[in-house]
Structures are given as C-alpha cells and as structure tokens.
Image (tube, rainbow, N blue to C red):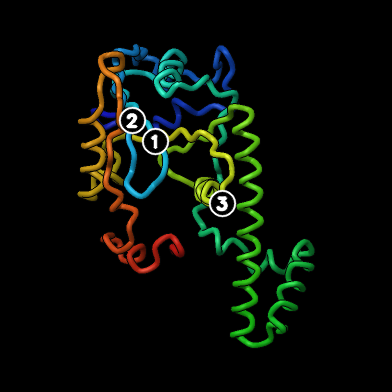
Amino acid sequence: MKYGGAKAASSVHEELQSHQVEDDLPNLRPAHPALKPAALADLRYTKFRISGIPGDKHAIFVPDHLAMTVPTFRNIASLVQKELPSMLLCGLSSLCHPSRMTTPQLRKCQGFVNLMQDARASLGAQGNTTVEAQKLVEVVNRVMEKKLVSAVGSIASAAFRMNVWTFSGPQISNLEVLLQQSFESGDAGVFRLVAAHAQDRAYMEHDGARNLMRDLFESSITPGLANFDQPFLLPGSLWEPNESLHSEFAAHGFDFWS
C-alpha cells in the first residue's frame, strides 16, 4: 500500500504490473525512474484480522517517494513469509454481479442450447410469459454462476500449487468476487496481493473506511523492531449490511449490486 502525497492509486498498478515474476523480475520496474528504491527499513508492516472474516491478513505501507523495485518486492514477500510468486494473475472482467452474468445474446447462442433446455425442463415451462421468462433467466444465471465459481476454484487450486498470486489494483473485477465465493466453498486459498493508495477517494470519503486505514497505519511498525504475537483486530462493520450507509448494500448485502 502506498501512502503520502497525492499520488494516484493507478500508478501503483503501473509499477507492479507484470505477467511473469521470475528471479530477475524483468517486468517489475519503477514507472517513475526518479523515485529511489525502498529499503526494508523504509517500509511499515502490520498483521491484522477483520472481525467476522476468517484468516490473518498483512498490510505493508510504502512511502510515496519510494519506487516499487524488484528488491522492494522481495522485501514485501519476505515480510509476509512468502517466496516470490512464479506469476501474478490479474482479472480483466467487469463488476457485473456473478448471479447476473448471462445476456440475451449469450442465452440465444448455440453453446447455451442444452442449458436452456435443462432450465425449461426443471421449471416445466417454456418461458412464453413474462414471469416464466424471468424465472428461466434466474435459473440459467444460477447455473452459470456455479459453473464460474467451480472454474475459478480450479484456477485458484492450480495457482496455490504453483505459487501464483492474484493481483488486484485500485479496481476489482469479477475474478476477485468469484475467488471469494470459491474460498467460502472450501477451495484452496491462493495468496492475494492488493495494491492501493491510502489516500484513494474510496477510503477518504467514508469515515469508517478512513478510520480503518488510519488504525492500520497506526498499528504498523518498522520491520525488525518488534514481532506481532497477536494480529491487530479491525471492526467488520464496513461489510455488515445493517450497519452500512450505502442504501443498496444495506438493502441487499452481497446478493445484488447495480
């Protein structure tokens, strides 16, 4: 996580963007050559948990004036006690809700013929009325979602075995959402790397998010000066629909977004 100044979060993505991470990490070089490399002592580290969400997580703060160089990335991997990844996977899809992935054109294509026939048979309907057509679409979407979760779960399991990390920049995609669903189904948890800027508007325009980021930073230490016996506990209210100020999330939770 970058912090300090007013640098855009997208530049973090530019600095880390790489398809193959090898020993010399040839594609991982600073987007701004004038920035100096970050030493381990320049970084700040904290381990934390979010209430209601399983698993320990790590946050590493990199000052804005330091570049994301190969040695910096090695330091980050060592802080989370991981070997350098063999590859970074990055999602390029939209943020369409996983339960609404099909389109009228997709449902009419040849590859969906059998699925549409099975859906009609399960409903005992032909989809001739508006209500029947809506139910048919819901069934097809549910089947499509399960197939996608299963496929992404297979990708996650293979990535876990091959020491491949997923990379998320300032904007997430369907890949991250489907990965989370596959983890909740018991699939192997691939290691996920997320790059952000502490002053991104997504954090700064909401008191809860801003306080969460502040608490994370205040709990962080310079690596090597102390050890974390217990992870820092963050409240999970941002992920609780009944506590959310966002009207759509408060009404539907993760089951729907426009």
Question: Residue reaching furthest bottom?
Answer: 129
Q: Amino acid at mark 2?
A: Lys
* Residue drawn at point x = 65 percent, y = 64 percent: 143
Of 76 and 11, nearer the camera is 76
Q: Residues within 10 Å of mark 3 (few under 14, many from 20)?
A: few
Horizontal placement of 227 versus 178: left or right?
left
**Please, is residue 102 above or below residue 9 in the view?**
below
Tell me, for residue 47, which label it has, or none.
2
Please report whichever mark, 3 or 1, sits nearer to the chain's N-terminal start. 1
State the separation of the CA atoms marked 1 and 2: 7 Å
**Please, is residue 244 above or below residue 69 in the view?**
below
State the separation of the CA atoms marked 3 and 1: 18 Å
- Residue to which mark 3 is pinned: 185
Split into 4 quadrants, where in the image is the N terminus?
top left
- Residue to which mark 1 is pinned: 56
In x, y percent, where is residue 202? 31, 46
In x, y percent, where is residue 170? 40, 40
Of 233 and 66, nearer the camera is 233
Q: Residues within 10 Å of mark 1 (few under 14, many from 20)?
A: few
